[in-house]
Amino acid sequence: MCLGDTVGYGPFPRECLELVRRRCEVVLQGNHDSGLIGETSIEDFNHYGVQAILWSRGARQRGRP
């Protein structure tokens, strides 16, 4: 089981998602996961969380996650 926030903390969001999908039967969406795809506002995230989400969004646009 994964309780969410798989992405938004480090430089390998795609690899993290692939690992979780292989190992977990149940995966919940965390606020960082939701923030990455724009379902949740990131304005209340701390500075590091915002920077990680913005980086991950850029990686997503470049075809990474």
Image (cartoon, rainbow, N blue to C red):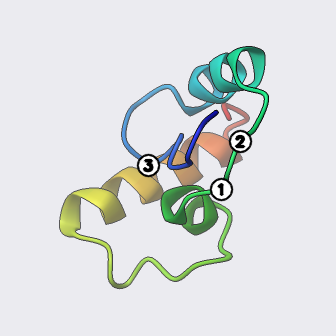
Task: Estimate the spatial distance between the alpha carbons at disc 2 and disc 1, rounded to whole Å.
Answer: 7 Å
Q: Amino acid at mark 3?
A: Trp
Task: Estimate the spatial distance between the alpha carbons at disc 3 and disc 1, rounded to whole Å.
Answer: 19 Å
Residue 2 vertical position relative to residue 5 in the rendered view, above or below: above
Q: Are marks 3 and 1 in contact (CB under 8 Å)?
A: no
Could you tell me which residue is drawn at 64 percent across and 33 percent down?
1
The image position of residue 53, as x and y in percent, is 45, 57
The secondary structure type at the circle numbered 2 is loop
Give the mark nearer the N terminus: 2 vs 3. 2
* Mark 1 Cα shell of 10 Å, populated few (<14), some (14-19), many (≥20): some
Q: Amino acid at mark 2?
A: Val
Picture disc at residue 55: 3
Q: Are marks 2 and 1 in contact (CB under 8 Å)?
A: yes
21 and 11: which is toward the camera: 21
Could you tell me which residue is drawn at 37 percent across and 84 percent down?
43
Residue 44 position by quadrant:
bottom left
Residue 34 vertical position relative to residue 63 in the rendered view, above or below: below
Q: Nearer the viewer, mark 3 or mark 1?
A: 1
Could you tell me which residue is drawn at 60 percent across and 37 percent down?
2
Q: Amino acid at mark 1?
A: Gln
* Mark 3 Cα shell of 10 Å, populated few (<14), some (14-19), many (≥20): some
Q: Quadrant of the C terminus?
A: top right
The image position of residue 30, as x and y in percent, is 56, 58
Q: Which residue is mark 1?
A: 29
The secondary structure type at the circle numbered 3 is helix
Task: Estimate the spatial distance between the alpha carbons at disc 2 and disc 3, rounded to whole Å.
Answer: 23 Å
Can you name the residue that lies furthest to the left here? 47
Q: Which residue is mark 2?
A: 27
